[in-house]
Structure formats: C-alpha cells, structure tokens
Image (tube, rainbow, N blue to C red):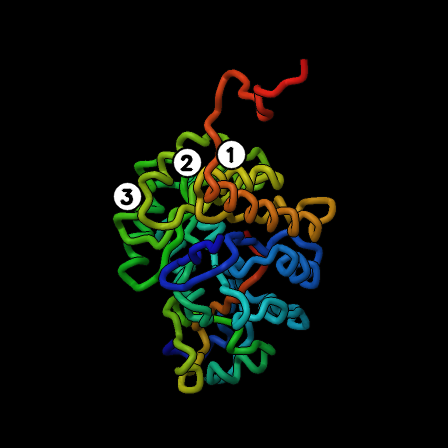
Amino acid sequence: MSDSIATSIILNGDPYPLHADTPLTALLERLNVRRMRVAVELNHQIVPKARYDETIVRAGDSVEIINFVGGG
Amino acid sequence: MQDTPFELGGIKFHSRLIVGTGKYRDFAETKAAVEASGAEIVTVAVRRVNITDRGKENLLDYLDPKRYQILPNTAGCFTADEAIRTCRLAREVGVGELVKLEVIGDNRTLFPDVAATIEAARVLVKEGFKVMPYVTDDPVTCLRLQEIGCVAVMPLAAPIGSGLGIRNPFNLAIIIEQAKVPVIVDAGVGTASDAAEAMELGCDGVLMNTAIAGAKDPLAMARAMKLAVEAGRLAYRAGRIERKLYATASSPLTGLIG
C-alpha cells in the first residue's frame, strides 16, 4: 500500500493488526504456527517454505494460512 | 497366497483400506481408529488455521506423515479453481503429491460435478499431482479420468455418509473391467459386508470415513472393516463359484446305506 493508513492485514479472511513490515517467519511465530504443519498464501500466491524468512508481510496484504484437519 | 502390492502413483501399500479422519470425538480417537483399521493411507481436509485458538493440537501430531501416507482432499470445493488451489496449498505442507480430488456439484446429495472434476484433474495432472478423483459410478467418466492420467479412479458406492452400500454393482463391474488404474470405492459404505462386497467385485481398495467414525464403537468397526477388506480381497482372488439355480450335493451320491 502506498499510503501509511493501513495498520492491518487480512489474515484468514479477518483483519489482523500489523503495524510494521514483518517477516513471514516472525508472523508465524507470533501466531504460534509451526511451519512444517502449514502452507501459506500471500496475496493469493503460495509462498514456498524455503522463502518464509525472506518474505515480508506488509499492511494491506492478504494472508492465508492453512493446515490439515479431520476429513474424509 | 501372496497378494500383489496395492500401488498408487508408484507408492506401494499393503492395506487396501483407506480411511478418513473426520467426525471423530478427538484426535486420540482418530488415531486409535486408524490404527485399528490397519490403514496406511489417511485422508485429511485442508482448512484455515484457527488463529484465535492456537492452543489446539495438530492432526499430524497424531498421524505421523512418516508412518502414514497423508491424502489431502478437496472436500467443500464446488469449482475446479477452488479444488486446484486447495491441492496446491496441500502439497506445500509437504506430504507428497497424492491428492483426493472432489468437486461437489450439489450440496444435498454431495454428488460430484463431473465436468469440473475432469477440468481440475487435467490441470493437476499437468502440475505433477497424483490425482485420485472421487466420481460418480459412471464408466465413461472413469475412462476419461484414466486417460487424463489420474493414478486411480474412485467411484462412489452411494452418497457420502449415506451408508447405503453398493447401489450399482453392475456399473462398478464395468468400471473395474475397463480400468488400467486402481479402482477404489469411495463413499457410501455402511458396514463390513459392503466393504467385502466391493472387494469381491474386484475393486482394488475401499475408502471410508463415516462408516467407522459414526459407528457406536468406532474402534471395533475399524477392525471389522480391516477384516472385511482383507476377506473380500481374498475371496475375489480365490475365485467364487458360479451362481446356480438348483442344488448340487456336497456329499457323495454313491455308497448310500440301504
């Protein structure tokens, strides 16, 4: 986002506060999410696990974090 | 009598029973039922991580991906695009290329959208996925999916969760006869005899969830299904007798007293 008004991201469909650019790894740690159990989309693009450290989440971004649950 | 291994996308398995992990009381019961079933492949669903309650344990903490082949499904997807996106995400978790493709066409029957399933299968196969599509028990659809390069076809026996058993054994017989890839009956099994019947028809495997998870004693039913799949497979390989209208005596007709 070019303006600095946005102070949140859309995380799994809901607003989530994010006041500064944050590496994806740090966001996952803050959420207590283990990288080996999830997959992540940033703005509808899958982020390969190898790039979690270098990927920066910015205000206004859309982030999806999925995992496996019981299913048939 | 040594059976040939059950092979899916180049991976060999011994158990021909694939079980779902939904509808259990908790992960501990899920794990116990999977163990009792003897299954080596378990299906899972792909869902958003619960952000607000992070104390929750993860299913994979109970079902070690090193021990079990995890088979992510696309349950809940109503379009090819949704299913493709779900498969891509599932693969990124890191449990391999096998996916159970299901594109639902109708919420009440949960019957598959055949056109969308074929469309999604085409894309996924090109992207290197080993696709196992859930489909209607339609021989032509199964042929098309096989031609596209799916590693198995998974016709339904009856609607998902219905427990109605095999409603169309004749279609299944045609599908099995035509198939060059494993045929796995997916959905509709209600009890052990349904699973045995599928295997006796010549199916390569059976996939079920509700029949076990919804039983009064899921662990006992898991074991019953394991035995039924084994018994059905063995009976199929043993070669059953022809059906005859009249009796043929089992005891000698000569040497009778009198």
Which type of secondary structure does the marked residue at label 2 adopt? helix
Q: Quadrant of residue B74?
A: bottom left
| B173 sits left or right of B252 in the view | left
Taking depth in this image into account, of A58 and B199 the one nearest to the observer is B199
Identify the subunit bearing mark 3. B
- Chain at tag 2: B
Residue B161, percent across and down? 58, 41
Q: Amino acid at mark 3?
A: Arg
- Per the image, the residue denoted by label 1 is B166
Identified by mark 1, the residue type is: Ile
Share a chain, discs 2 and 3? yes
Q: Contact, CB < 8 Å: mark 2 with mark 1? A: yes
Q: Earlier in the sequence, mark 2 or mark 1?
A: 1
**What residue appears at the point 40 percent right and 86 percent down from the top-left corner?**
A54
| Label number found at residue B172 | 2
User: Is the Cβ of the residue at disc 2 closer than 8 Å to that at disc 3?
Assistant: no
Q: Are marks 1 and 3 in contact (CB under 8 Å)?
A: no
Residue at 37 percent across and 56 percent down: it is B131
Residue at 42 percent across and 58 percent down: it is B99
Q: Secondary structure at mark 3?
A: helix
**Badge 2, how many Cα within 10 Å: few under 14, some, many 20+?**
many
The answer to whether one can see residue B58 in this image is: yes
Q: Amino acid at mark 2?
A: Leu
Q: Which residue is mark 3?
A: B144
Residue B136 lies, in percent from the top left, at 41, 38
Q: Nearer the viewer, residue A31 or B144?
A: B144
Q: Position of residue B21 (x, y in %)?
A: 59, 56
Q: Earlier in the sequence, mark 2 or mark 3?
A: 3
